[in-house]
Image: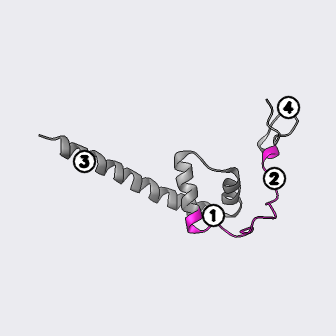
């Protein structure tokens, strides 16, 4: 069953799905994402759930260096939390 929001052309491309122009009703149009919006995008990327609207905003107005830095910090914190949980489990199960 065809989704009504997709073009009728049998060859579906990503260009067809995402408009080149930003939406005019977006209040933050033309502004870079805030720290909290970038953090939300990083967390969504970690879980693999990012809306098309937010992804378009990030790629259009965001700086790659900010996302790389925040993503690196998130990854390091995530690894440290996992190592801490493993250490705690090892300590609690040791006899």
Q: CA distance from mark 2 to mark 3?
A: 48 Å
- Nearer the viewer's eye, disc 2 or disc 1? 2
Q: Which numbered circle lies on residue 10?
A: 4
Provide the residue designation for mark 1.
63
Q: x and y percent of residue 18 in the render?
A: 78, 49
- Nearer the viewer's eye, disc 1 or disc 3? 3
Q: CA distance from mark 2 to mark 1?
A: 20 Å
In this image, 65 relative to 94: left or right?
right
Q: CA distance from mark 2 to mark 4?
A: 18 Å
Q: Secondary structure at mark 4?
A: loop
Task: Give the residue drawn at x 55%, y 65%.
Answer: 36
User: What are the residue bounds of the magenta stretch?
Assistant: 15-37
Mark 1 surroundings within 10 Å by alpha-carbon count, few (fewer than 14), some (14 through 19), many (20 or more): few
Mark 3 surroundings within 10 Å by alpha-carbon count, few (fewer than 14), some (14 through 19), many (20 or more): few
Provide the residue designation for mark 3.
87
- Lower sequence index among marks 2 and 3: 2
Q: x and y percent of residue 31 in the render?
A: 70, 70
């Amino acid at each position: 069953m065809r989704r009504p929001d997709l073009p009728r052309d049998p060859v579906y491309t990503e260009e067809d799905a995402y408009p080149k122009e930003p939406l005019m009703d977006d209040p933050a149009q033309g502004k870079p994402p805030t720290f909290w919006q970038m953090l939300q995008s990083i967390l969504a990327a970690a879980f693999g759930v990012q809306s098309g609207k937010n992804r378009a905003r990030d790629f259009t107005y965001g700086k790659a260096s900010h996302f790389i830095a925040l993503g690196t910090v998130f990854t390091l914190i995530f690894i440290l939390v996992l190592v801490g949980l493993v250490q705690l489990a090892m300590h609690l199960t040791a006899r």
